[in-house]
Image (tube, helix red, strand yellow):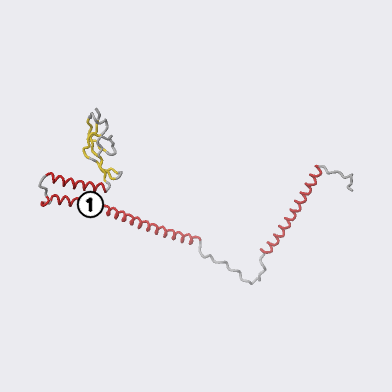
């Protein structure tokens, strides 16, 4: 039977008891850690101490250094210079090869264009040959028109475009104004007359159109 005189510990007594238990546990852990550290130190000292050798035992020779740091750097620099020279040579060969290939492409394209233009020249020579001379002006004019159309088609197929800005607003990027003149029909700053047509290749202006610009009424 439980002793009725025993009293339940107070909160302060319980806290003091828990604090004492915690402190005792910490002290025990600290003492164990110190003992382990001392044992480890003794083992390390025993391993580090060299074994006694006879007085007349020969000293161990130090290993010889294979290469100095300066020699290694010199070798690396020589290798880097060699790689650089090889890259420069390869790039120079690539540049020469690319230039040669580009020139071949241009010559091939020019060759095809000249081949077609030579056909136009052949037609001109046949038209002016004595045995093919037209007996009347109308037939001759018709033949010249056919050669003109053939020539224009060759240029058009090669990418040449004609600039004919009649009635359009004046554009200094594509047109060259020769003069201004008043006009009742054409608004101011618009092209009245094309004196000479211009030409462009794709989007590049080869020759601007020479025009007369309206100054208005």
Residue 153 drawn at (x, y percent): 23, 47
| In the image, residue 168 above or below residue 46 | above
Q: Which of 42 and 31 is in front in this view?
A: 31
Report the number of numbered marks.
Answer: 1
Q: In this view, does 182 lie above or below 163?
A: above
User: Residue 159, how many percent across, how many down?
Assistant: 28, 47
Q: Residue at x 46, y 60 (%)?
A: 76
Residue at mark 1: 116
Residue 54: percent from left, percent from top: 66, 71
Task: Name the image quarter holding the C terminus.
Answer: top left
**Relative horizontal placement of residue 149, taking residue 36 as reference (left or right):** left
SS at circle 1 = helix
Q: Nearer the viewer, residue 145 or 162?
A: 145
In this view, which residue lies farthest toward the top? 217
Q: Vertically, is 190 above or below 126?
A: above
Residue drawn at 20 percent across, 52 percent down: 119
Residue at the farthest bottom position: 56
| In this rendering, position of residue 53 left or right of residue 105 | right
Name the spot of residue 162 as percent of width and height, x first.
25, 42
Circle 1 Cα neighbour tier, 10 Å, few/some/many (<14 / 14–19 / ≥20): some
């Amino acid at each position: 039977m439980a002793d009725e005189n025993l009293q339940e510990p107070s909160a302060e007594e319980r806290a003091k008891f828990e604090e004492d238990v915690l402190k005792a546990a910490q002290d025990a852990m600290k003492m164990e850690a110190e003992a382990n550290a001392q044992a480890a130190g003794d083992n390390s000292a025993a391993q580090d101490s060299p074994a006694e050798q006879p007085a007349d035992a020969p000293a161990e020779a130090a290993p010889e250094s294979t290469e100095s740091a300066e020699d290694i750097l010199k070798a690396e620099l020589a290798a880097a210079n060699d790689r650089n020279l090889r890259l420069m040579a390869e790039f120079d060969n690539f540049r020469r090869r690319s230039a040669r290939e580009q020139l071949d492409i241009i010559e091939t394209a020019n060759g095809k264009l000249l081949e077609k233009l030579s056909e136009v020249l052949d037609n001109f020579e046949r038209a002016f040959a004595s045995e093919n001379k037209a007996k009347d002006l109308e037939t001759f004019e018709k033949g010249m028109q056919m050669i003109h159309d053939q020539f224009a088609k060759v240029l058009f197929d090669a990418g040449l475009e004609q600039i004919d800005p009649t009635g359009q607003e004046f554009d200094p990027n594509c047109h060259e104004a020769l003069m201004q003149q008043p006009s009742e029909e054409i608004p101011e700053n618009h092209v009245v007359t094309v004196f000479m047509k211009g030409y462009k290749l794709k989007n590049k202006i080869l020759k601007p159109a020479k025009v007369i610009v309206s100054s208005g009424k």
